Image (tube, rainbow, N blue to C red):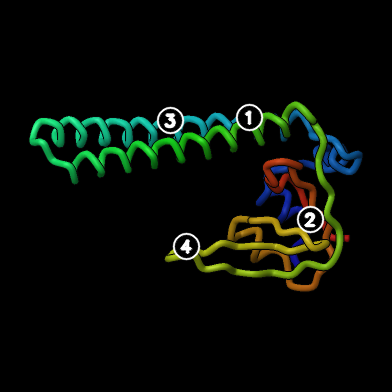
Amino acid sequence: MSSAPDLMQLLDFTPDDLQVNRAGKLSPRQAARLMRIRRRSTLVSAGIMLLIGLAATLVMFLAQRDNSTIGLLVGITLTIINAIVMARAVQNWLRLADDLNGGTVETLSGGVQRTVRVIGRALIYVLKIDQREVVVPKAVFNAVPEGARYRLFRAQRSGTLLAAEPV
């Protein structure tokens, strides 16, 4: 069974953060963490959109110059993919902004069920508690034993796990 200090280190929270979370609030330290996550997500999304946009522009330019219908369709497809990436980025930004503006945390309490999902070559580690699923890093997944009773604190809209403690 994992001890509370192990989870504190893995999830990067302090006893003060935990106390604030027990009151249903987001600590200033956790708010700063969510802002860093939002900034990093925005920068990565912007970089991806820029690359896809440049690729779409280049493909459509070459397709127009060579009078290629297939090239034009590829360029249009890249533009649609870029729009989807943009929509997901905006959705993620809005969720994190809502978490930061609301300042509240969701508390899940009960027995933990552990699940590993395989999507392609990626492993997704999921803790299910109180009929709700929380995606966690592998280290946190391994630190929480199957069937153990835990209280998890997470951001309401984004679902970001902020803190956890054995009950």
The residue to which callout 3 is attached is 46
The residue to which callout 1 is attached is 35
Q: How many marks?
A: 4
Q: Position of residue 71 (x, y in %)?
A: 18, 42
Viewed as shown, does residue 130 lie left or right of 161?
Answer: right
Q: CA distance from mark 1 to mark 2?
A: 25 Å
Packing grade of label 3 (10 A; few <14, some 14-19, many >=20) is some
The residue to which callout 2 is attached is 4
The residue to which callout 4 is attached is 122
- Give the label, 3 or 1, closer to the camera: 3
Q: Which quadrant holds the N terminus?
A: bottom right
The type of residue carrying mark 4 is Ala
- Give the label, 3 or 4, closer to the camera: 3
The type of residue carrying mark 3 is Ala
Q: Is residue 37 in view from this perspective? A: no
**Is residue 104 positioned above or below 6 on the image?**
above
Tag 1's secondary structure? helix
Tag 3's secondary structure? helix
